[in-house]
Image (cartoon, rainbow, N blue to C red):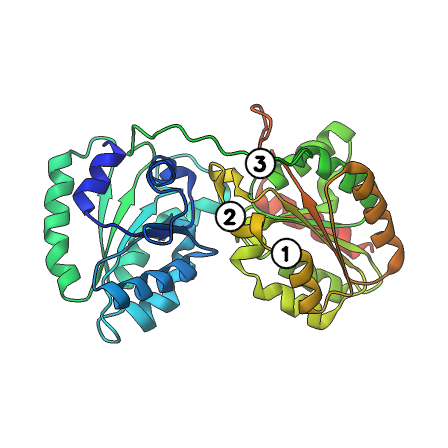
Amino acid sequence: MKVQKLVEIIGADFYTGVPDSQLKALCNYLMAAYGIDPAHHIIAANEGNCTALAAGYHLATGKVPVVYMQNSGEGNIINPVASLLNDKVYAIPVVFIVGWRGEPGIHDEPQHIYQGEVTVRLLEDMGIQPFVIGKDTTDEEVEAAMEAFRSILAAGKDVAFVIRKGALTDAPKVEYRNENRMVREEIIQHIVKASGEDPIISTTGKASRELFETRVANGQSHKYDFLTVGSMGHSSSIALGVALNKPGQRVWCVDGDGAVLMHMGSMAVLGANRPGNLIHVVINNGAHETVGGMPTVAGSIDLVAIARACGYPNAVCVDSFEDLDRELMAARERHELSLIEVKCSIGAREDLGRPTTSALENKNSFMEYLKTL
């Protein structure tokens, strides 16, 4: 169905969420209609964040908000749904729009397979009434579903539209760009050169795909890298777990701005533990590029100041390859926890591939390599 028709049927005037490629039509529609506007549309750091934000909107206005997200974000909403929204607690009505990655029978990446299997069941277990929209779902069917939802929402309960692949159409064209010059794939190539045979934990999305292809281009083994293909926002915590248990080995984390924002508390834990063998590189393009390029707030915050406040003894920001190479080598030599924020452009190769090894193969080869260190 046309995305504008879905918005009209729902009839809400406030949306908040975390962008998803399955919901790109909706995300582009909201960006074209509102941009980032506190009165109508806010992109949050994580799905729990936007659920609580929606609750605040309802408390202040009495209106029903909409929260959009990929189904991978269902885990992040369990606590606020169960202990804040639920009708046994505050009875706060919310309409969720959930992109259904990994739907059974539809080919998808490994991190989406199990999540796809349990997507609808999780919603039902949380007391959220779902309605699935596919390519063949008519406007009249969605209107009828929304009409039934209104009595559920009036009772202080929550509902969800689950969006199948390709179900939403007629997205407006929105260009996402910034003024940064450095290209992420080239940044990763410089990190790989500096890291040598050190283990790297890389974040969700295109960064891991580019790391995989950099190893292929260099004729190198993939054993050095743990590709965090799912679990967005947790790669730095994985890296911390590795670094603390391999204290004699330097460990690198290649992170992204959207991922850092999603679970920023991990930076405080990193700073408190101060592993001298961990180098945290945050590639910041101010965008959720892997799912379409919608903006994050990282373009307007000071990650270096945040890192220092969290206890990182070393934190710098670079915007040129000359400065990047200098700071990578300095971090290698100082044996202290370091953060390097790298300002990055938006964009990737059209022919960027995906890892050709399975997640389990990746884990096993990485663990075997760590045993040798």
| Residue 343 point in image, percent of width and height | 67, 43
Q: Which of the image's four quarters has the C terminus?
A: bottom right
- Mark 2, secondary structure of its residue: loop
Q: Can residue 309 be seen in this view?
A: yes
- Mark 1, secondary structure of its residue: loop
The residue at the point 17 percent across, 60 percent down is 153
Q: Earlier in the sequence, mark 3 or mark 2?
A: 3
Q: What residue type is labelled 1?
A: Asp
The residue at the point 39 percent across, 42 percent down is 35
Residue receiving disc 3: 178
Are there few (<14), some (14-19), or many (20+) residues within 10 Å of tag 3? Answer: some
| Residue 179 point in image, percent of width and height | 61, 35
From the viewer's perspective, tell me whether residue 286 is left or right of residue 57: right
Residue receiving disc 1: 302
Residue 174: image quadrant is top left
In front: 370, or 309?
A: 309
From the viewer's perspective, tell me whether residue 337 is left or right of residue 353: right
**Is the residue 139 above or below the residue 155 in the image?**
above
Alpha-carbon span between mark 3 and mark 1: 17 Å
Are there few (<14), some (14-19), or many (20+) residues within 10 Å of tag 1? Answer: few
In front: 369, or 316?
A: 316
Residue 85: image quadrant is bottom left
**Is the residue 297 above or below the residue 51 in the image?**
above
Q: What residue type is labelled 2?
A: Thr
Q: Is residue 196 visible?
A: no
| Residue 58 point in image, percent of width and height | 26, 64
| Residue 290 point in image, percent of width and height | 52, 38
Disc ID at residue 296: 2
- Mark 3, secondary structure of its residue: loop
Tell how many labels.
3
**Is the residue 89 above or below the residue 77 in the image?**
below
